[in-house]
């Protein structure tokens, strides 16, 4: 009876050790998968239709949005509403932010 208990204990210890090893391996593969997923997402964003619009046209669209008084509202860190379309457009994605930052005329609309 004691031998059976010792064998069972040794077997449990060995299985726990193998589970730990496999958990480490799974963690490694999850990190690889997450990295591949981020890379895939980055590449897909470059294929978005909005990227095919010439920067001049996109800038003009943004300029119209800013000049038409469309109510884009962002909130300051104190919780006060700020009516600044250029700030809202600049938070959509990195590409739009770059377009906004490169056009000085957008910064004339911030009061």
Image (cartoon, grey):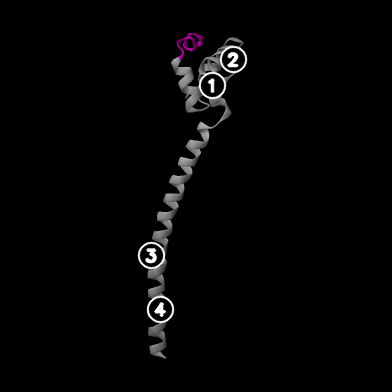
Badge 3 or badge 2: first in the primary sequence: 3
Q: Please say if the residues under marks 1 and 2 sit with CB atoms less than 8 Å apart.
A: yes
Badge 3 or badge 4: first in the primary sequence: 4
The residue that appears at 46% across and 47% down in the rendered structure is 34
Q: Which of the labelled discs sits on residue 72, or is there none?
A: none
Q: Label 3's element? A: helix
Structural distance between the alpha carbons of marks 4 and 1: 61 Å
Badge 1 or badge 3: first in the primary sequence: 3
Q: How many marks?
A: 4
Q: Which of the labelled discs sits on residue 11, or is there none?
A: 4
Badge 1 or badge 2: first in the primary sequence: 2
Would residue 104 be counted in the magenta stretch?
A: yes
Percent x, y of residue 91: 50, 25
Per the rendered image, the range of residues in magenta is 103-111
Residue on which the image places disc 3: 21
Residue on which the image places disc 1: 89
Q: Which of the labelled discs sits on residue 65, or is there none?
A: 2
Q: Nearer the viewer, residue 86 or 93?
A: 93
């Amino acid at each position: 009876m004691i031998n059976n208990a010792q064998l069972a204990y040794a077997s449990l210890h060995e299985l726990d050790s193998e589970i730990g090893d496999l958990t480490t391996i799974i963690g490694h593969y999850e990190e690889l998968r997450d990295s591949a997923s981020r890379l895939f997402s980055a590449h897909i964003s470059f294929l978005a239709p909005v990227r095919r619009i010439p920067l001049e046209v996109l800038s003009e669209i943004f300029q119209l949005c800013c000049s038409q008084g469309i109510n884009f509202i962002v909130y300051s860190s104190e919780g006060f509403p700020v009516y600044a379309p250029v700030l809202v457009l600049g938070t959509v994605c990195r590409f739009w932010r770059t377009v906004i930052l490169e056009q000085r005329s957008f910064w004339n609309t911030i009061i």
